[in-house]
Amino acid sequence: PELGEDPNRVYRLGIMGGTFDPIHYGHLVTAEQAREALDLDLVLFMPSGNPAFKQDKHVTGAEDRYAMTVLATAANPAFYASRFEIDRPGVTYTVDTLRELRSYYPDNVELFFITGADAILDILLWHDARDIARLATLIAATRPGYDINQACERIEGSGYPFDVRYIEIPALAISSTNIRTRVSEGKSVRYLTSESVIGFIRKNGLYRQGRAGSSKGDE
Ligand code: ATP
Ligand code: MG
């Protein structure tokens, strides 16, 4: 999306990456409060095309994950669902996304990469972590069940030049894995994600029996 062309202004662009299988209120609250706390002009929700860490797991097709991301973000004028990673062939690396965004947008755009506490723990293992640190400010959000302090100590002790901002998010112990499991067991997922996403899951028969495997890299 275009961010505006005021040469006297630095635009602040947030990137919320994820598998979004499916997107849920944990993602949406995190992005919204990051937007507010860091005064972001726009948050791009970027479903991963072919996640590097989820190669061995069943992941719902990119178009369905993207469609649900569009549905869930549609009403927020500061949110934008991006096809950037799903249209790129091959394995998704966050660093490539940041590099491409950096070269696509002119110098007056600052990049902020938003992650929950579990993803921060992983980030040092990601491809070219040093360049991730150089390209974007990291927004580290609390997530129930994960120790953000431990994660941040490791980031700061890494020797990479990370600029990290911490934000405390109202605790929502919601995960996509739990939603998939609940759907496969015929249980309710109401109020865990938007009605539009729930309708899409039903209509397209997503996450039915036998297809609810965890996509967490560490499980
Ligand atoms: P899965 O269970 O399939 O791994 P997930 O719920 O962890 O799904 P992801 O798409 O893996 O969702 O996460 C995308 C990003 O959103 C990550 O940075 C993750 O830390 C963050 N996130 C996900 N759920 C929450 C939550 N409930 N609170 C805060 N951050 C969250
Ligand atoms: Mg996850």
Image: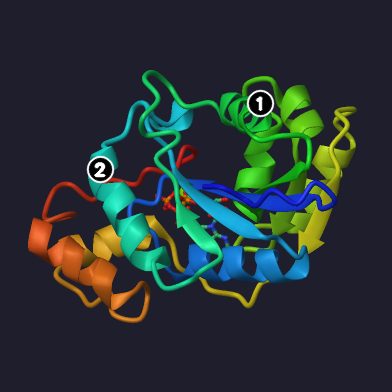
Residue 147: x %, y % from top left: 71, 57
Which residue position is annotated with label 1? 103
Residue 60 in view of the camera? no
Q: Residues within 10 Å of mark 2 (few under 14, many from 20)?
A: some
> CB under 8 Å between callouts 2 and 1?
no
**Colour logic:** rainbow
Residue 19 in view of the camera? yes
Q: Quadrant of residue 209?
A: bottom left
Quadrant of the rendering where the C terminus is positioned: top left
| Residue at image point 85% right, 51% down | 8
In the image shown, does 150 or 11 lie closer to the viewer? 11
Residue 205: x %, y % from top left: 9, 57
Eye-nearest disc, 2 or 1: 1
Identified by mark 1, the residue type is Ser
SS at badge 1: helix
Identified by mark 2, the residue type is Glu
Is tag 2's residue or tag 1's residue first in the polypeptide sequence? 2
| Residue at image point 81% right, 48% down | 152
Which residue position is annotated with label 2? 63
